[in-house]
Image (cartoon, helix red, strand yellow):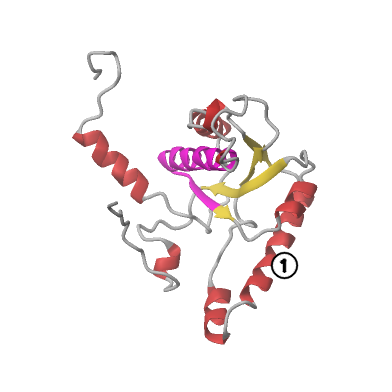
Amino acid sequence: MTGSAGAPEFGAEFRARFAELVAWRRDVRRFRPDPVPDDAVRECLALAGLSPSVGNSQPWRFVRVSDPDRRAAVTASFLRCNEAAATTYDDARAAAYRSLKLAGLREAPLHLAVFCDETTGAGHGLGRATMPEMLRYSAVTAIHTFWLAARSHGLGVGWVSILCPEEVTAVLDVPTAWRLIAYLCVGYPAEEHADPELVRHGWQARLEAQMLER
């Protein structure tokens, strides 16, 4: 259905389904080994490319990581950083931290590294003279769009942030001006849960969104 200017109209049924999609966008760490269809990946990336970006700069750079040695090096970085993070907590919280599964690097059939090209000339610098970090925020919008698109295909995505960005950049042999924003594990979930894993395992409860009045 379209409106008078040709723009689509999204009714109550669509909004309800969209809310359901957002609610089921979980951070997945447990994957089945089934391969991810290439056409699904291409469709999700095409939708990610429609994301908003500052000055239409489109600074996101997706890198598919297939080489076993590179994957192993990324996993090694995770293990080092994960253990270092555990030591920052007191004994009880450290034990709780170590009990969590925080990545599906070994199980996920598809690995995607997402970078922000901080030297892109696209957009001619519009909108980022005073807030240069908007380039990175733009890359995050593409990641979130990809995540929702993947969920619509029945795929799960896990965002691994417990990594050394410089190590991953070197391992993947990408330009040094590319800043690592996310390392994504993608595949079909081995489990389906409506609640976030960190809620389910008692790490942190969901907080209600707040809006201040000024």
Q: Is residue 113 left or right of residue 144?
A: right
- Which region is colored magenta? 135-158
194 on left or right of 29: left
Q: Could you classify mark 1 by the number of other residues whose Cα lies within 10 Å: few (under 14), some (14-19), or many (20 or more)? A: few
- Image quarter where the N terminus lies is top left
Q: Amino acid at mark 1?
A: Arg
| Label 1 secondary element | helix
Q: Position of residue 202 (x, y in %)?
A: 42, 74
Residue furthest top in the image: 5
Magenta stretch prevailing secondary structure: helix
Q: Residue 191: which quarter of the image?
A: bottom left
Residue at position x 59%, y 25% in the image: 123
- Front-lying residue, 80 or 131: 131
Left or right side of 122 for 6 = left
Residue depicted at x 48% and y 55%: 27
Q: Which residue is mark 1?
A: 80
Q: Is residue 125 visible?
A: yes
Q: Residue furthest bottom?
A: 91
With respect to residue 67, does 122 lie above or below? above
